[in-house]
Amino acid sequence: MTTTATASPAISVSDLRKSFGEKSVLNGVDLSVPAGTVFALRRPGRARAAELLERFGLTDAADQPPSTYSGGMRRRLIRLHDLVGRRLQDS
């Protein structure tokens, strides 16, 4: 699909800001997405979670429900949960 420079964008945002209390997470973001384009924003938290999964040796088991893990793996998941702060649930 070809998009011309004069076509109106499907999404246009200018100077977007978002904060949680004192923590600023978006600061002056400008974004324009042309119609017919697939676009996604990835959260930096996912990159951090992937890094932690690697550090604890959990990358191979990342898509398995926690109930299938051994006792040792569950203990590593608990440590990972403490670092990430997100409860792990079975799908």
Image (cartoon, rainbow, N blue to C red):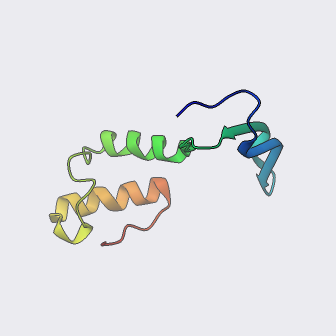
In the image, is 88 to the left or to the right of 33? left
On the image, the x and y values in percent for residue 62 come to 27, 53
Question: Is 48 situated above or below 91?
Answer: above
Residue 85, given in percent of the width and then of the height, sits at: 50, 60
- Camera-side residue: 39 or 4? 4
The answer to which of 89 and 31 lies nearer the viewer is: 31
Residue depicted at 45% across the width and 59% down the height: 82
Would you say 80 lies left or right of 67 here? right
Q: Would you say 30 lies left or right of 72 here?
A: right
Q: Where 71 sits versus 9, above or below?
A: below
The reply, left or right, for residue 5 in relation to residue 87 is: right
* Residue 38 pos. (x, y %): 53, 43
Q: Quadrant of residue 91?
A: bottom left
Residue 53 drawn above or below residue 78: above
Identified at 47% across, 46% down, the residue is 46
Q: Position of residue 3 (x, y in %)?
A: 63, 31
Residue at 41% x, 60% y is 81
